[in-house]
Amino acid sequence: MLPNDFSFTHACAIVLLLTSWFAYSTIFKVMSKESINSKLIAVRWQWIKQITRYERSPFDAILIGHIVHSVAFFGSATLIVLAGLFSVAINLDSIHATMIGLHFINNASIELFTIHFALLAVVLTISFFSFVYALRKLVYAIALIGALPVITGSRAVDYDEDSLDLLIEDTAMVVTESLKTFNFGIRGYYYAIAAIFLFVSPLACMLVTLVATSVLIYRQLSTSTAHSINQYVQQRQRPN
């Protein structure tokens, strides 16, 4: 049973938050726009292709190691935050009594307060599992990169050009999928902030959700970084 003070506005705020997070990539398809993340697919393909043209370089190992360490760091940090949340849950009654005494916090029942707290915990838990899954995908990607043939002479030994291109495409796609999962977890932090504002009011949560989504879309489409990446991709794809 839902608490008596759980209103339709609360339900709309929760649905809007989760929908904005999970449908983030679909938004660009509806807008008929390509995001930075989609453009970088071509860049990763070129990177993996270059690995097959030369001997394995320390720089490639540094890049892969940096990605792995970044994912592992966010996973560890999120786990620490979750541990803190669950320790707070033990004293939820006293925290509820303290927070409703603040003038900017919505005077919610303990049951509704628990729902707000649970939403925040769910968002961070999903982010944590996203980081774990991204790390697992990267382990697969490292194996694929390490097993890529290196061209000697005019072609790779035992591989024709079409087969080699297929290996490059599959490897780049696994790397891309792992980073998509990682980015999904990163976006969870934005929506965790929105979930915190649900303690203030459902309208505040919806407003922060829309602001967070707008900021994420703006960074993907209209920043100087986005324009530079777009020009970079266009230059890389331009025939010689």
Image: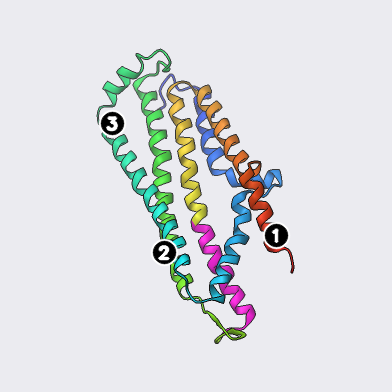
- The quadrant of the image that shows the C terminus is bottom right
**Span shown in magenta:** 159-178
Front residue of 2/51: it is 51
Which residue position is annotated with label 3?
88
Is residue 78 in the magenta section?
A: no
Depth check, mark 2 against mark 1: the one in front is 1
Which residue position is annotated with label 1?
235
Q: Find the distance from the CA under tag 2 to the CA under tag 3.
A: 34 Å
Image vertical order of residue 236 relative to residue 77, above or below: below
Is residue 164 in the magenta section?
A: yes
Image vertical order of residue 49 relative to residue 120, above or below: below
What kind of residue is marked 2? Val
Which residue position is annotated with label 2?
139
- Tell me the crowding category of disc 1: few under 14, some 14 to 19, or many 20 or more residues within 10 angstroms, Cα based: few
**x 37%, y 19%: residue:** 109
The mark nearer the N terminus, 2 or 3, is: 3
Front residue of 6/139: it is 139
What kind of residue is marked 3? Val
**Percent position of residue 138, x then y:** 44, 61
**x 43%, y 45%: residue:** 127
Which element is circle 1 on? Answer: helix
